[in-house]
Structure formats: C-alpha cells, structure tokens
Image (cartoon, rainbow, N blue to C red):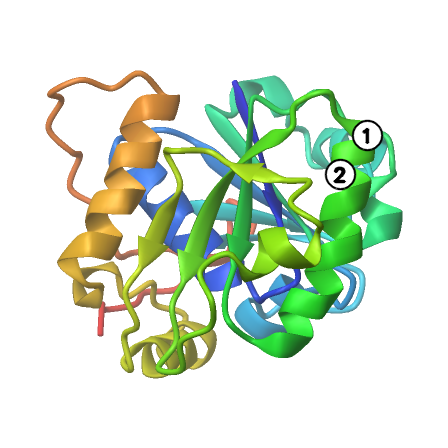
Amino acid sequence: MKLVQLLGSMNKADFALYLGYTIASYDKRVLIVDSTKDQVYRYGYTRLEENEYLYELQHVEILTGAENWRDVVKSLQEDGDDASKYDCIIVDVDSMPILLEQWPNFDEVLYVSDNDRLNVQKDIPLLHRWLDENSAKELRRIHFESAYKVPEGLISLLMNNRIEFSPFSETLEYDDLGGRLRLIMQHDEIIPYKKLSKQYKQVLTDLVTEWLDINDLPKAKPSFFGFGKKDKHHEHEVLEG
C-alpha cells in the first residue's frame, strides 16, 4: 500500500480525483481521504447525507471527515473494509491542526500550489511546520500556473529560503478550461480525464507508474458506470462528458 499526502491550501480535490482516476485505470484500488478543514470533497464532489462518509466516484473511493489515521481505520472497519486492501491511499491536508494529528509515515508528500495570494500566504506557516515535523528538507511540488505570473521563487523567498523543492517537481501550464472541468466534476459527477491537457495527463501517469512500480503495462479501460454512496446495492449510471 502506498501512502500519499497532498499538502497545501489550494483546492486540491480536482488534482486528487484525476490522480485517483489514473490509479484506478491501472486496475488498482485507491482511496482519497478528505481531511480538509472545510470538507471540500463532501460538499463539492459527493452526494453524501449527514451521517454518511464513504462515496465512490468512477472507481475512486472517497472517505470524508477523517481528521487522523484512527478515524480512517475506524470508518473503514465500520464499513467492513481495511486500509491494507488499497493499493494507494491519498490524504488531502490543508490546515495546521490536521497536519499535526497522528498519521503514519507517508511514502510520498506532494505540495500542491498555485498563484493565488491567499493560498500562498496560508501555505507559508503550513510549510514551516511541515519542515519542523519532518527530517526531510526537500519537498516535491506540483504547481498550477495562472494567467498572472508571480516570481518563480516566491515561496522560497517568503520562507527565507528554508525550503528546497525537489528536482522532480512539476509546473503545469495555465489552462482556462480548468474551471469548467471542475464544475463538470462537481455537478455531473464525471471525472473528465480525457479533456485534460497532454502535459497534465503525462504528469499524472508519471507519478502513478513511479509510485506503483508499473512498467509498460497497458491501462485497463476505465468504466464509467457506478458511482454513489459506497454501498453494494446503490448504483447509478453516468456517461463521460
């Protein structure tokens, strides 16, 4: 099982769902843990009722409301499942209190960032604390460009050059289609992977094949049938947009 942490203040749900979709396309089981402060996945991407916490969107399983690893284990056990049965678990963290909760050692940590000033300002203390809590001083970054360019080394400058970004970091070119695809995902419950840029797809594929040690294996054809509450008796049909 691969444990991945997504760190940062921007809305990382789109990226996480595309990443999960890519993992699932290799016939691997993936779980996204929504540990965001505002429960972004629950309210933006699922149709969960008040007392429900597990959802499935095109073979990407989502667990909401987990603030630490105990919550993850407990919620899965209550559903008759187990964390060890997943090939990859992705935990989305965007706040200091959740960062400081009890988590296992992550195999991979990605700092996901953009040029939004509000997010940049929130990320500075979050990254400082991550550095304080971890021996590694180098962090892999996935950065989403915007139409407005900011200085390339802005984050490092604001952190007094305390942080180093891995040479395996990636900057994704600005795509004005991104906002529309987010709304498609939120309202139509479709992961519009095919509409992503070639560069975006390549970054996702490179990450997944590296993490899961997949070499020259053909992707399983993704099925666009079945999403909803994680219940064997609850099924819907969707078509990709």
Query: What is the number of the mark on residue 133?
Result: 1
Q: Position of residue 135 (x, y in %)?
A: 73, 20
- Foreground residue among 4 and 67: 4
Query: What is the number of the mark on residue 155?
Result: none
Q: Which residue is mark 2?
A: 130
**Is residue 71 in view from this perspective?**
yes
**Is residue 231 in view from this perspective?**
no
Kind of element beneath mark 2: helix
Q: Give yes or no for contact between labels 2 and 1 (Cβ–Cβ under 8 Å).
A: yes
- Foreground residue among 80 and 100: 100
In this picture, is 158 found above or below 72? Answer: below
Q: How many other residues sit within 10 Å of disc 2, few (<14), some (14-19) or many (≥20)?
A: some
Q: Position of residue 192 (x, y in %)?
A: 27, 66
Quadrant in which residue 108 is drawn: top right
Q: How many other residues sit within 10 Å of disc 1, few (<14), some (14-19) or many (≥20)?
A: few
Q: Amino acid at mark 2?
A: Trp
Q: How many marks?
A: 2
Residue at point 75%, 26% (across, down) = 134
Q: Amino acid at mark 1?
A: Glu
Quadrant in which residue 132 is drawn: top right
Residue at point 51%, 71% (across, down) = 115
Say left or right for 48 vs 128.
Answer: left
Kind of element beneath mark 1: helix
Quadrant in which residue 171 is drawn: bottom left
Q: CA distance from mark 2 to mark 1?
A: 5 Å
Q: Position of residue 202 (x, y in %)?
A: 20, 45
Q: Position of residue 181 (x, y in %)?
A: 33, 76
Residue at point 27%, 44% (across, down) = 203
On the rendered image, what quadrant is the C terminus found in?
bottom left
Say left or right for 204 vs 185.
Answer: left
- Foreground residue among 113 and 25: 113
